[in-house]
Each structure stands twice: as structure tokens, then as C-alpha cells.
Amino acid sequence: FSCYVCVHNETNQPVQSVSIKADLQTSLQRVPLTTQNHTPIMLDVDETLSDVIHHEVKDLGTHILVCEVTYMSNYNTLVSFRKFFKFEVMKPLDVKTKFCNVESDDVFLEAQVQNITSGPIILEQVTLEGSQQFSVKSLNEIDDGTSVFGDVTLLQPQESCQYLYCLTPKESISKDIKLMAAAKNIGKFD
């Protein structure tokens, strides 16, 4: 999530002690978003105070960006106003997985990543981090380390891309059939 927050002095006088505060509110929490300018400043006529805010959104559902501007009025009193911007965060990707066990105790994981939004998405990186029980080898690169998908993986709406990984059980569990059967945590798909 990125947003541009801007306050512009449209009056014919300078405005003292101007500051911007932004929070992101969900149904569960209110997260203060950092802004570059923490100290109040003076805005001359036709001047602007602005900031770009970045925040990783992890929760789905309704979010409200709450922007509060505080300033000193002509009567030397502190005045503030708020603006609310409501938006929905939807699940952008659907991931389906298939596992294939082979005789060598290796497990092949096929992950199909589908864009379920109404617009295109660029996948910068798709990785599988192995758990303590498995080591992971990505089968999505050519010998020189470049991706089989090219420099950029662009998924149009409803398009999907398939990734393949080889999981090898670590020695600590590969020799014990009971530990192998109980090994359920393969790692984290990111």
C-alpha cells in the first residue's frame, strides 16, 4: 500500500505549525503510519506539505486511511481536521499446490499462482523457504541463474504461472520412517 498525502495552503496568509498524521484503521487495529515530517512547519501562501507513505497491508477486508492535519489558526488556537479514505483489500492471488512423491524420498511441489484481480500483476519474486525438515531446490531457473519466465513475470487477470520445487528431506529425518511420515511442514511459500 502506498499513498501520497498532500496539504496545500490556498489562503492569502501563511499558516503556522502545520503537521500531518496518518493512521490505517482496520476492524482489528489502528496502525500509525510514519511520515517524514514530524515537526510542525510554516506553510507560506501557495506552499505544499506532502509525503509518500508506504505500508505492507497484511489483512484482507475494509481499511480506512485516516489523515489528520493540525495547524495554528489566526486566533492562536490549535485547529485540526480529519479526512477518511475507505478502501477494500482483496486477495490478489490464488495458490494451488500439488505434491508428487518419488522413490528417492524427494517430493516435488508444483505451485500454481493465479491472478484473481481485475488488473495485471507483476510477480517480482516467488520463493519457497524450506522448513527445518526439508531443503528446497527451485527448478524455476536456467543454469545461469535467470528465471525461466524472463526478467518480469506479468500475470494478466485470471492468468496463472506454475512454479516447481524439489524438496529433499534432511538427514535428521530421512533415515527414520516414522519421522518421514510425520513430516508435514515443508516450508513457507512467499
Image (tube, rainbow, N blue to C red):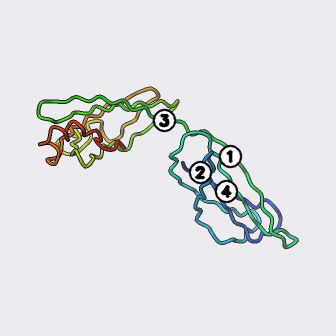
Tag shown at residue 6: 4
Residue at mark 2: 3
Q: Earlier in the sequence, mark 3 or mark 4?
A: 4
Q: How far, Cα to Cα, is label 1 from label 3?
A: 21 Å
Do the CB atoms of the residues marked 2 and 4 lie less than 8 Å apart?
no
Please name the amino acid that badge 4 sits on.
Cys
In the rendered structure, which disc, 2 or 3, sits on the residue that comes first in sequence?
2
Label whose residue precedes the other's in the sequence (1 or 3): 1
Q: Give the amino acid type for the residue marked by disc 2 in the picture.
A: Cys
Residue 81, by quadrant, is bottom right
What mark, if any, has residue 85 been given in the picture?
1
In the image, which is nearer the foreground, mark 2 or mark 4?
A: 2
Q: Quadrant of the C terminus?
A: top left
| Residue at point 68%, 52% (across, down) | 66
Residue at position x 72%, y 67% from top? 18
| Marks 2/3: CA–CA distance | 19 Å
Cβ–Cβ under 8 Å for marks 1 and 2: yes
Q: Amino acid at mark 1?
A: Phe
When asked about the image quadrant of residue 140, the answer is top left
Relative to residue 128, is residue 67 depicted above or below?
below
The x, y position of residue 109, in whole percent, is 26, 33
Q: Is residue 69 above or below residue 136?
A: below
Check disc 2 and report its element: helix, strand or loop.
Answer: strand
